[in-house]
Amino acid sequence: MPLKIVVAPASFKGSLTPVAAAEAVTRGLKRVLPSAEVAAVPVADGGEGTVEVLRLALGGRTRAALVTGPLGSETVSAAWAVLDGGRTAVIEMAAASGLPLVPPQRRDPMVTTTAGTGELIREALEAGCPHILVGLGGSATVDGGLGAMRALGAALLDAEGRPVPPGGRGLLELARVDVSGLDRRLARVKITALCDVDNPLLGPDGAARVFGPQKGADESAVDLLERGLENLVRVVRRDLRLGWDPGSLPGGGAAGGLGAALAAFLGAELVSGIDFVMKAVGLAERIAWSDLVVTGEGQLDGQSRRGKACAGVAREARRTGRPVVVLTGSVRGEDEAVAALGLDAVLPVVPGPMSLVQAMDRAAVHVEAAAARLARLLVVGSRLGRGGGPGSGPF
């Protein structure tokens, strides 16, 4: 019987889309195991690659829009898609406000803005889509979603009635929110936010303290961002007359607080991005068919268990009793990752010491080679299972 393998990677951020990663893994496996049946089912969790994965799974048309980039001073071309015959739009904030769009030396969440993501939502409104999916993940921002809300018509004012500055800096100066100018079409659409993490907006697991350093914030900036987000919650609860706390909402800390803003300002529903995508691509049925699941993403760390793609794929594999292997660019605490995610094995894709730039430039080559190494290990395991004698070939 040929070995049946499901290949379900997410993106390797900034280097490989989920589709490109799935193609590289498939090539590596088939190089060593040509008789294996390999089903490529790329996935995403709301971050990079979400638009591509859902468009391929559900059918639709890709569009592009010129929107404000995360630094606010430049424009970027951001892809989004119309699905279901025009009934659903899917955008991803990574395409408009994503971390890879900012050079490392200019990363500063006190400055970066989600304005372009709000402009993408406006594009979806122009297209007349009654349901808008917003992928939250991979952001360069911790502005609490203020940039996006301003792009949609909200007035965000300081104590003197002037517009607050963009980026995390504006959070500290915010004194009043006026939503009377919000685009009226928003009242007629359903917005679903696909969150890549379940972190809240505030606290030790919140947007500033967990994600701020990844986006360029030093210790003092993290403290300022936390204070600013606390101020945002106070002002929004008062001016929008909310009967619930945006600071503790699961997923509210996704995309630097854009999750909380979408819920508070626009009444969006926040859901697990990987759960939504796995259902859309029919991953459960493919895993039930398989003997082995191979997933992957750029990095495994303490946040992986909080809603990232590999955690979702591993959970589904465990549910059906299938072994699951992760190929990853880097891992922090391999034993902890295996235990927390229920993985059977973690294989690094980088073959030796090299810079991050070198690793990313040849990501497809590295991922393919890692998949081939995995396939050779499967051959060894098969031979051991059959006694390992001469002629005991794979599977």
Image (spheres, rainbow, N blue to C red):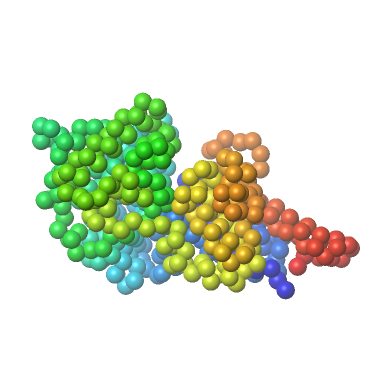
Q: Quarter holding the N terminus? A: bottom right
Along the line of sight, which residue is nearer the eye, 77 or 83? 83
Check the image and name the residue furthest to the front. Answer: 243
In this view, the residue farthest toward the right is 390
Q: In the shown orientation, is residue 292 left or right of residue 301?
A: right
Q: Is residue 19 visible?
A: no
Q: Quadrant of residue 231?
A: top left
Instruction: Give the quadrant of residue 352.
Output: top right
Q: Relative to 218, does residue 152 appear above or below in the rendering?
A: below
Residue found at x 47% / y 64%: 278
Residue 241 visible in the displayed image: yes
Residue 98: % across, % down: 38, 45
Q: Position of residue 339 (x, y in %)?
A: 60, 49
Report the quarter where the C terminus lies: bottom right
How many marks the image carries: the answer is 0
Q: Is residue 106 left or right of residue 67?
A: right
- Picture coordinates of residue 189 (x, y %)? 23, 63
Name which quarter of the figure residue 125 lies in.
Answer: bottom left
- The x and y percentages for residue 165 are 21, 34
Q: Nearer the viewer, residue 29 or 283?
A: 283
The residue at the point 87 percent across, 66 percent down is 391
Q: Residue furthest top?
A: 220
* Residue drawn 41% across the image and 30% down it: 105
- Identified at 49% across, 59% down, the residue is 43
Q: Nearer the viewer, residue 393 or 314?
A: 314
